[in-house]
Amino acid sequence: MARFLIEVPHEEDEIACIRAVKILLESGSHFLTHADFGCEDGVHKAWIIVEADTRSEARNQLHPYYRNAATVVALSKFTLEQVEELLTHHGS
């Protein structure tokens, strides 16, 4: 199963922040109830890491209100050996 970072923006007013937190907490999904928010630092977004088979499946874990505005990014990790192999392959 792949891991995805989902970034969920919302409007920049206090009610919108409260609504975003409430909707994500009420979703019941373990992943969504562990969202991190940037509101108190002036960045009106939530970030969530989820596991899913596809990007579409990851997006569908969100409440429909936020699905279209969300950015979903597939996450990867690399070992030092993989990086060395990539550098060798690309002649650097």
Image: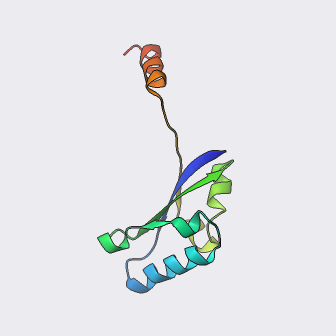
Side (left or right) of 30 relative to 69: right
Residue at left 39%, top 84%? 14
Please identify the residue farthest to the left as the structure is shown: 41
Q: Residue furthest bottom?
A: 15
* Image quarter in which the C terminus is found: top left
Residue at left offset 56%, top offset 51%: 4
Q: Quadrant of residue 88?
A: top left
Where is residue 37 drawn, in percent x and y?
42, 68
- Above or below, 22 against 8 in this view is below
In the displayed structure image, the side of residue 25 where residue 88 appears, left or right: left
Q: Position of residue 7 (x, y in %)?
A: 48, 60
Give coordinates of residue 41: x percent, y percent.
30, 70
Asked where in the image residue 39 lies, by quadrant, the reply is bottom left
Q: Residue at x 62, y 59 (%)?
A: 59
Left or right: where 43 falls relative to 72: left
**The N terminus: image quadrant:** top right
Count of numbered labels shown in the rendering: 0
91 up-or-down from 21: above or below: above
Colour style of the rendered protein structure: rainbow
Q: Position of residue 38 (x, y in %)?
A: 37, 68
Q: Is residue 72 above or below residue 92?
A: below
